[in-house]
Image (tube, helix red, strand yellow):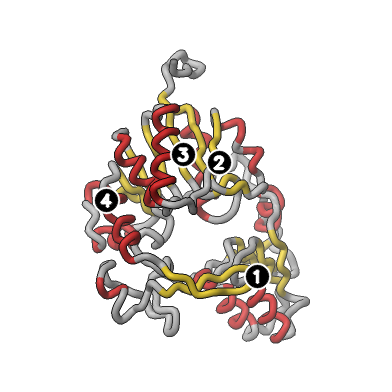
Protein backbone atom coordinates (compact mmCIF):
# COMPACT_ATOMS: atom_id res chain seq x y z
CA UNK A 1 0.00 0.00 0.00
CA UNK A 2 1.54 3.30 -1.05
CA UNK A 3 1.52 6.27 1.31
CA UNK A 4 -0.41 9.43 0.54
CA UNK A 5 0.81 12.99 0.92
CA UNK A 6 -1.05 15.85 2.59
CA UNK A 7 -3.21 16.32 -0.52
CA UNK A 8 -4.26 12.68 -0.52
CA UNK A 9 -2.21 11.79 -3.58
CA UNK A 10 -0.53 8.39 -3.74
CA UNK A 11 3.24 8.68 -3.31
CA UNK A 12 5.53 6.53 -5.42
CA UNK A 13 8.60 4.97 -3.83
CA UNK A 14 12.07 6.22 -4.79
CA UNK A 15 15.41 4.58 -3.98
CA UNK A 16 18.10 7.23 -3.46
CA UNK A 17 21.55 5.62 -3.74
CA UNK A 18 24.76 7.27 -2.55
CA UNK A 19 27.97 6.09 -0.91
CA UNK A 20 27.51 8.41 2.06
CA UNK A 21 24.65 9.47 4.31
CA UNK A 22 25.31 12.92 5.76
CA UNK A 23 27.52 15.76 4.59
CA UNK A 24 30.87 15.08 2.99
CA UNK A 25 31.47 16.81 -0.37
CA UNK A 26 29.67 18.16 -3.44
CA UNK A 27 27.61 15.04 -4.14
CA UNK A 28 26.17 15.08 -0.63
CA UNK A 29 25.54 18.83 -0.79
CA UNK A 30 23.53 18.28 -3.98
CA UNK A 31 21.40 15.75 -2.10
CA UNK A 32 20.83 18.23 0.74
CA UNK A 33 19.63 20.84 -1.75
CA UNK A 34 17.32 18.55 -3.75
CA UNK A 35 15.98 16.04 -1.20
CA UNK A 36 13.47 18.45 0.44
CA UNK A 37 11.77 18.78 -2.96
CA UNK A 38 12.08 15.10 -3.93
CA UNK A 39 10.52 14.04 -0.61
CA UNK A 40 7.42 16.10 -1.42
CA UNK A 41 6.77 13.87 -4.44
CA UNK A 42 8.12 10.47 -3.37
CA UNK A 43 8.53 8.16 -0.40
CA UNK A 44 12.32 8.10 -0.29
CA UNK A 45 14.42 5.17 0.87
CA UNK A 46 18.14 5.88 1.19
CA UNK A 47 20.71 3.17 0.30
CA UNK A 48 24.21 4.04 1.56
CA UNK A 49 27.52 2.65 2.80
CA UNK A 50 28.89 5.15 5.33
CA UNK A 51 27.16 7.50 7.77
CA UNK A 52 29.44 10.55 8.00
CA UNK A 53 27.73 11.68 11.25
CA UNK A 54 27.79 15.24 9.87
CA UNK A 55 24.28 16.71 9.89
CA UNK A 56 22.94 13.19 9.21
CA UNK A 57 20.02 13.83 11.54
CA UNK A 58 18.72 16.60 9.30
CA UNK A 59 18.08 14.05 6.53
CA UNK A 60 16.04 11.69 8.70
CA UNK A 61 12.72 13.61 8.51
CA UNK A 62 12.94 13.62 4.70
CA UNK A 63 13.14 9.85 4.18
CA UNK A 64 10.89 6.91 4.96
CA UNK A 65 13.66 4.39 5.57
CA UNK A 66 17.36 3.78 5.00
CA UNK A 67 19.45 0.70 4.25
CA UNK A 68 23.17 0.49 5.03
CA UNK A 69 25.17 -1.75 2.71
CA UNK A 70 28.81 -2.48 1.86
CA UNK A 71 29.37 -0.78 -1.52
CA UNK A 72 32.73 -2.59 -1.77
CA UNK A 73 31.21 -6.09 -1.61
CA UNK A 74 31.92 -8.62 -4.36
CA UNK A 75 29.94 -8.23 -7.55
CA UNK A 76 27.85 -11.42 -7.30
CA UNK A 77 27.06 -10.80 -3.62
CA UNK A 78 26.09 -7.20 -4.28
CA UNK A 79 23.77 -8.26 -7.10
CA UNK A 80 22.04 -10.90 -4.96
CA UNK A 81 21.56 -8.63 -1.92
CA UNK A 82 20.40 -5.69 -4.02
CA UNK A 83 17.94 -7.91 -5.89
CA UNK A 84 16.44 -9.17 -2.64
CA UNK A 85 16.03 -5.59 -1.40
CA UNK A 86 14.38 -4.57 -4.68
CA UNK A 87 11.87 -7.45 -4.52
CA UNK A 88 11.08 -6.64 -0.90
CA UNK A 89 10.65 -2.85 -1.21
CA UNK A 90 9.48 -2.62 -4.88
CA UNK A 91 10.66 0.91 -5.75
CA UNK A 92 8.99 2.80 -8.59
CA UNK A 93 12.13 4.72 -9.51
CA UNK A 94 15.85 4.52 -8.63
CA UNK A 95 18.02 7.64 -8.43
CA UNK A 96 21.76 6.89 -8.21
CA UNK A 97 24.40 9.39 -7.11
CA UNK A 98 27.83 8.00 -6.13
CA UNK A 99 27.88 4.21 -6.62
CA UNK A 100 30.59 2.25 -8.44
CA UNK A 101 29.55 -1.30 -7.51
CA UNK A 102 28.78 -3.13 -10.77
CA UNK A 103 26.69 -5.79 -9.02
CA UNK A 104 24.39 -3.19 -7.47
CA UNK A 105 24.04 -1.24 -10.72
CA UNK A 106 23.28 -4.39 -12.74
CA UNK A 107 20.57 -5.37 -10.24
CA UNK A 108 19.01 -1.92 -10.53
CA UNK A 109 19.07 -2.21 -14.34
CA UNK A 110 17.60 -5.72 -14.40
CA UNK A 111 14.79 -4.77 -12.00
CA UNK A 112 13.24 -2.74 -14.82
CA UNK A 113 11.94 0.47 -13.23
CA UNK A 114 13.08 3.92 -14.48
CA UNK A 115 16.72 4.63 -13.58
CA UNK A 116 18.30 8.07 -13.19
CA UNK A 117 21.96 8.77 -12.49
CA UNK A 118 23.51 12.01 -11.25
CA UNK A 119 27.09 12.10 -12.55
CA UNK A 120 29.14 14.32 -10.25
CA UNK A 121 32.63 13.59 -11.58
CA UNK A 122 34.68 11.39 -13.93
CA UNK A 123 34.60 8.13 -11.92
CA UNK A 124 32.32 6.38 -14.38
CA UNK A 125 34.72 6.48 -17.32
CA UNK A 126 38.17 7.31 -15.88
CA UNK A 127 39.98 4.64 -13.86
CA UNK A 128 41.98 7.33 -12.07
CA UNK A 129 38.74 9.33 -11.68
CA UNK A 130 40.24 12.77 -12.27
CA UNK A 131 40.69 12.73 -16.09
CA UNK A 132 44.13 14.31 -16.26
CA UNK A 133 47.72 13.06 -16.43
CA UNK A 134 49.02 12.56 -12.87
CA UNK A 135 52.51 13.80 -13.81
CA UNK A 136 52.01 16.82 -16.06
CA UNK A 137 48.32 17.41 -15.15
CA UNK A 138 47.34 17.76 -18.82
CA UNK A 139 43.63 17.09 -19.37
CA UNK A 140 42.73 13.82 -21.09
CA UNK A 141 40.30 14.23 -23.99
CA UNK A 142 40.16 10.59 -25.12
CA UNK A 143 37.27 8.15 -25.00
CA UNK A 144 37.67 5.37 -22.42
CA UNK A 145 39.19 2.32 -24.04
CA UNK A 146 42.57 0.86 -25.02
CA UNK A 147 44.24 4.27 -24.60
CA UNK A 148 43.50 3.95 -20.86
CA UNK A 149 45.90 1.00 -20.83
CA UNK A 150 48.55 2.26 -23.25
CA UNK A 151 50.05 4.79 -22.82
CA UNK A 152 48.07 6.06 -19.80
CA UNK A 153 48.57 3.00 -17.54
CA UNK A 154 45.38 4.05 -15.74
CA UNK A 155 44.80 0.64 -14.04
CA UNK A 156 47.69 1.58 -11.73
CA UNK A 157 45.93 4.09 -9.51
CA UNK A 158 47.50 5.96 -6.64
CA UNK A 159 45.06 6.10 -3.74
CA UNK A 160 45.64 8.83 -1.20
CA UNK A 161 44.20 8.92 2.29
CA UNK A 162 44.89 10.91 5.44
CA UNK A 163 47.03 7.99 6.65
CA UNK A 164 49.21 7.90 3.50
CA UNK A 165 49.07 6.66 -0.08
CA UNK A 166 49.30 3.36 -1.94
CA UNK A 167 49.18 1.99 -5.47
CA UNK A 168 46.09 -0.10 -6.28
CA UNK A 169 44.93 -2.05 -9.33
CA UNK A 170 41.74 -0.94 -11.10
CA UNK A 171 39.91 -3.43 -13.32
CA UNK A 172 39.68 -2.31 -16.95
CA UNK A 173 36.84 -4.80 -17.53
CA UNK A 174 34.76 -3.42 -14.66
CA UNK A 175 35.34 0.15 -15.82
CA UNK A 176 33.98 -0.72 -19.26
CA UNK A 177 31.02 -2.50 -17.61
CA UNK A 178 30.39 0.64 -15.55
CA UNK A 179 30.02 2.69 -18.74
CA UNK A 180 27.77 0.12 -20.42
CA UNK A 181 25.42 -0.20 -17.44
CA UNK A 182 25.21 3.58 -17.02
CA UNK A 183 24.37 3.99 -20.73
CA UNK A 184 21.24 1.89 -20.11
CA UNK A 185 19.89 4.38 -17.55
CA UNK A 186 16.73 6.27 -18.46
CA UNK A 187 18.41 9.66 -17.91
CA UNK A 188 21.77 10.97 -16.70
CA UNK A 189 22.08 14.33 -14.94
CA UNK A 190 25.33 16.33 -15.16
CA UNK A 191 26.34 19.70 -13.72
CA UNK A 192 27.70 21.40 -16.85
CA UNK A 193 27.87 21.44 -20.63
CA UNK A 194 31.48 20.24 -20.34
CA UNK A 195 30.36 17.05 -18.59
CA UNK A 196 27.53 16.53 -21.07
CA UNK A 197 30.05 16.74 -23.93
CA UNK A 198 32.29 14.28 -22.05
CA UNK A 199 29.46 11.72 -21.77
CA UNK A 200 28.68 12.11 -25.48
CA UNK A 201 32.37 11.40 -26.17
CA UNK A 202 31.98 8.24 -24.07
CA UNK A 203 29.07 7.08 -26.26
CA UNK A 204 26.02 8.28 -24.29
CA UNK A 205 22.91 9.39 -26.16
CA UNK A 206 22.54 13.18 -26.26
CA UNK A 207 18.79 13.02 -25.53
CA UNK A 208 19.38 11.11 -22.28
CA UNK A 209 21.67 13.74 -20.76
CA UNK A 210 20.20 16.65 -18.78
CA UNK A 211 22.21 19.56 -17.36
CA UNK A 212 21.35 20.10 -13.70
CA UNK A 213 23.57 22.85 -12.20
CA UNK A 214 24.38 22.53 -8.47
CA UNK A 215 22.61 25.67 -7.31
CA UNK A 216 22.36 26.55 -3.59
CA UNK A 217 19.09 26.77 -1.71
CA UNK A 218 17.57 30.27 -1.82
CA UNK A 219 17.53 32.31 1.37
CA UNK A 220 14.66 34.72 2.02
CA UNK A 221 16.89 37.06 4.00
CA UNK A 222 20.48 37.32 2.88
CA UNK A 223 23.02 38.69 5.39
CA UNK A 224 24.79 41.90 4.48
CA UNK A 225 28.46 41.27 3.88
CA UNK A 226 30.61 42.99 6.50
CA UNK A 227 33.85 42.54 4.53
CA UNK A 228 35.98 41.89 7.58
CA UNK A 229 39.20 43.87 7.97
CA UNK A 230 41.00 40.51 8.10
CA UNK A 231 40.43 40.08 4.34
CA UNK A 232 38.95 36.61 4.81
CA UNK A 233 39.25 34.16 1.91
CA UNK A 234 37.18 30.94 1.96
CA UNK A 235 38.07 27.50 0.59
CA UNK A 236 35.21 25.10 1.34
CA UNK A 237 35.31 21.69 -0.33
CA UNK A 238 36.84 18.24 -0.10
CA UNK A 239 40.62 18.55 0.26
CA UNK A 240 41.93 16.30 -2.50
CA UNK A 241 44.70 17.05 -4.97
CA UNK A 242 42.37 17.88 -7.84
CA UNK A 243 40.71 20.68 -5.87
CA UNK A 244 43.95 22.69 -6.10
CA UNK A 245 44.37 23.91 -2.52
CA UNK A 246 48.15 23.61 -2.89
CA UNK A 247 47.99 25.93 -5.93
CA UNK A 248 46.02 28.46 -3.89
CA UNK A 249 48.48 28.30 -0.99
CA UNK A 250 51.44 28.89 -3.31
CA UNK A 251 49.61 31.77 -5.00
CA UNK A 252 48.96 33.44 -1.66
CA UNK A 253 52.70 33.74 -1.02
CA UNK A 254 52.61 36.51 -3.66
CA UNK A 255 49.96 38.53 -1.80
CA UNK A 256 51.36 41.61 -0.01
CA UNK A 257 48.19 42.58 1.88
CA UNK A 258 47.16 40.99 5.16
CA UNK A 259 44.67 38.14 4.73
CA UNK A 260 43.21 35.06 6.39
CA UNK A 261 42.45 31.92 4.40
CA UNK A 262 39.91 29.67 6.14
CA UNK A 263 40.04 26.09 4.84
CA UNK A 264 36.91 24.02 5.48
CA UNK A 265 36.60 20.28 4.90
CA UNK A 266 38.97 17.32 4.98
CA UNK A 267 40.47 14.80 2.59
CA UNK A 268 43.51 12.88 1.44
CA UNK A 269 45.52 16.01 0.49
CA UNK A 270 44.97 17.83 3.78
CA UNK A 271 48.17 16.72 5.52
CA UNK A 272 50.29 17.64 2.49
CA UNK A 273 48.72 21.11 2.38
CA UNK A 274 49.22 21.60 6.12
CA UNK A 275 52.91 20.76 5.73
CA UNK A 276 53.12 23.16 2.77
CA UNK A 277 51.67 25.94 4.94
CA UNK A 278 54.29 25.25 7.62
CA UNK A 279 57.15 25.24 5.11
CA UNK A 280 55.99 28.61 3.76
CA UNK A 281 55.56 29.97 7.32
CA UNK A 282 51.91 30.90 6.71
CA UNK A 283 50.41 29.25 9.82
CA UNK A 284 49.12 32.60 11.13
CA UNK A 285 47.37 33.34 7.82
CA UNK A 286 46.01 29.96 6.69
CA UNK A 287 43.72 28.20 9.16
CA UNK A 288 42.30 24.69 8.71
CA UNK A 289 38.81 24.75 10.26
CA UNK A 290 37.62 21.21 9.42
CA UNK A 291 33.87 20.57 9.25
CA UNK A 292 31.46 23.25 10.50
CA UNK A 293 27.69 23.63 10.36
CA UNK A 294 26.07 25.36 7.40
CA UNK A 295 24.99 28.24 9.66
CA UNK A 296 28.57 28.85 10.79
CA UNK A 297 29.85 28.58 7.23
CA UNK A 298 27.23 31.09 6.06
CA UNK A 299 28.27 33.58 8.72
CA UNK A 300 31.91 33.31 7.64
CA UNK A 301 30.96 33.80 3.99
CA UNK A 302 29.12 36.93 5.12
CA UNK A 303 32.38 38.45 6.33
CA UNK A 304 34.63 37.18 3.53
CA UNK A 305 36.07 39.14 0.63
CA UNK A 306 36.02 36.12 -1.68
CA UNK A 307 35.35 32.42 -2.07
CA UNK A 308 37.90 30.40 -4.06
CA UNK A 309 37.61 27.38 -6.36
CA UNK A 310 41.21 26.68 -7.50
CA UNK A 311 40.34 23.33 -9.08
CA UNK A 312 42.97 21.80 -11.41
CA UNK A 313 40.78 18.98 -12.75
CA UNK A 314 38.42 19.41 -15.70
The residue sitting at 66% across, 38% down in the picture is: 57
CA distance for labels 2 and 1: 25 Å
Q: Is label 4 in a helix, a strand or a loop?
A: helix
As displayed, is residue 78 above or below residue 157?
above
Measuring from the top left, give residue 185's x and y in whole percent: 29, 44
Give whichever of discs 2 and 4 has the lower sequence position. 2
As displayed, is residue 130 above or below residue 189?
below
The residue where tag 1 is placed is 163
> Residue reaching furthest right?
284
Give whichever of discs 2 and 3 has the lower sequence position. 3
- Is 278 situated left or right of 310 in this image? right
CA distance for labels 2 and 3: 12 Å
Say few, some or many: other residues with alpha carbon within 10 Å of mark 4 (under 14 / 14 to 19 / 20 or more).
some
Q: Residue 16 has which mark?
A: 3
The residue where tag 4 is placed is 183
The residue where tag 2 is placed is 68
Measuring from the top left, give residue 245's x and y in whole percent: 58, 73
As displayed, is residue 130 above or below residue 6?
below
Q: Is label 3 in a helix, a strand or a loop?
A: strand
State whether residue 43 appears in this view: yes
Q: Nearer the viewer, residue 159 or 79?
A: 79
Say few, some or many: other residues with alpha carbon within 10 Å of mark 1 (under 14 / 14 to 19 / 20 or more).
few
Give whichever of discs 1 and 3 has the lower sequence position. 3
- Residue 96 location, quadrant: top left
CA distance for labels 1 and 3: 31 Å
Say few, some or many: other residues with alpha carbon within 10 Å of mark 2 (under 14 / 14 to 19 / 20 or more).
some
Which of labels 1 and 3 is toward the front?
A: 1
Amino acid sequence: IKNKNSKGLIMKKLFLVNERFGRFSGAEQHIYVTLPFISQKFDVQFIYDEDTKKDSNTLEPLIQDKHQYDFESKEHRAYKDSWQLLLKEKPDIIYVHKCMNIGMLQAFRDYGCPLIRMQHDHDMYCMRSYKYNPINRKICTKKAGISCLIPCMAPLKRERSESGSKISWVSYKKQMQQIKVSQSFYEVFVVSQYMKDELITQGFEDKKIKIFPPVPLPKHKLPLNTYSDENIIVFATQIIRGKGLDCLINALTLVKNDFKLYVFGSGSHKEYCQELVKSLKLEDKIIFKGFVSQDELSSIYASAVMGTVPSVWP
